[in-house]
Image: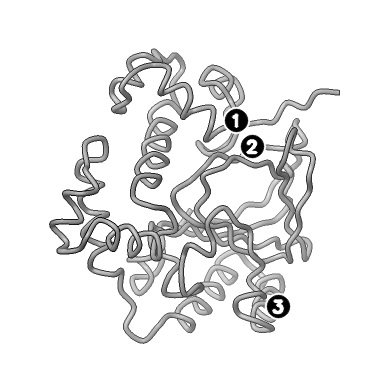
Amino acid sequence: MLRPPRALDDFIEHIWYWEGDPLPHRRELVMASHTAGLLVNLAHDELRHYAGVGYATPQRTRGIALCGPSSRHFAIDAHQPKIMGVQFKPGGVHPFFAPSARLLTDAHVALEDIWGPAACRLHHRLVEAPTAERKIGVLCGALMARMRCTPEIHPVVSLALDRFDGEPFGARVGAVAAEAGLSRRRFIGVFAEHVGFTPKLYLRVRRFQSVLKRVFGATGVDWSEVAYLSGYADQPHFNRDFKSFSGLTPSQYLARRGSGQNHAALVEVG
């Protein structure tokens, strides 16, 4: 993983590149996330994910695509021989791609549908670039060229994200709206337009992600303590949110953790 250039730092969390051998399992679960990502398949002009009951429904896009903020879990092929991507910060997709981040929520969208033929040309350049460093340079250059002349996170959204980061388990949407000088309804609309989620859903998924971060590297976990420290009112509430956003029970997640906190091996029956 690499930090982005300074010009992109307000919008991008990190840029990553992966090249490796097949894994022992065929598919991986990807958990719900409050941030969006750009994926680039450097081996084929296709990206696949699987949804529906038993993850039996394959869905395909071209080889460079956006995965928006997601409140749902889905599956992907575990073996990606050569792939790279960008993980955006909350609200970070707005300067580059969609007039409203809500259009990307729970969606996988081919970049061609947003940028047109320029996306296909970019994909070709990324495949042809000889090294990982050159590929990352090409991708950063393309993003900077697409960035709006005066890019910035909307001040209301910036305020909200700052308050939500400072008090993630006790933040009150109405209080932040009042501080921003907006009605609750208008505040929710502005936030969702730039981040993709309503504030309430953003806080729920963000809290779930904080749980994954807390337990990902742990060898033993007291789930009652994790639920308490993460601000859940009770264990059943914690269990429901965890299953809703991951498709797994907490114990199943621990047993199947992948290479990153947001991934787990999918055990397929039959």
Please say if the residues under marks 2 and 3 sit with CB atoms less than 8 Å apart.
no
Residue drawn at x 16%, y 49% as measured from the top left: 175
Q: Which residue is mark 1?
A: 247
Please say if the residues under marks 2 and 1 sit with CB atoms less than 8 Å apart.
yes
In the structure shown, which secondary structural element does the residue marked by tag 1 occupy?
loop
Q: How is the image coloured?
A: one colour
Looking at the image, residue 250 lies above or below residue 74: above
Q: Which residue is mark 3?
A: 120
Residue drawn at x 44%, y 49% as measured from the top left: 34
Between the residue at mark 2 and the residue at mark 3, the CA separation in whole angstroms equals 28 Å
Say left or right for 228 vs 69. left
In the structure shown, which secondary structural element does the residue marked by tag 2 occupy?
strand
* Residue 200 percent coordinates (x, y): 35, 45
Q: Which residue is mark 2?
A: 29
Q: Nearer the viewer, mark 2 or mark 1?
A: 1
Q: Which mark is residue 154?
A: none
User: Where does the C terminus fall, quadrant-wise?
Assistant: top right
Q: Farthest residue in the right direction?
A: 270
Answer with mark 1 or mark 3, whichever residue precedes in sequence: 3
The picture quadrant where one finds residue 170 is top left
Looking at the image, residue 56 lies above or below residue 80: above
Kind of residue at disc 2: Leu
Kind of residue at disc 3: Cys
Residue drawn at x 63%, y 71% as measured from the top left: 111
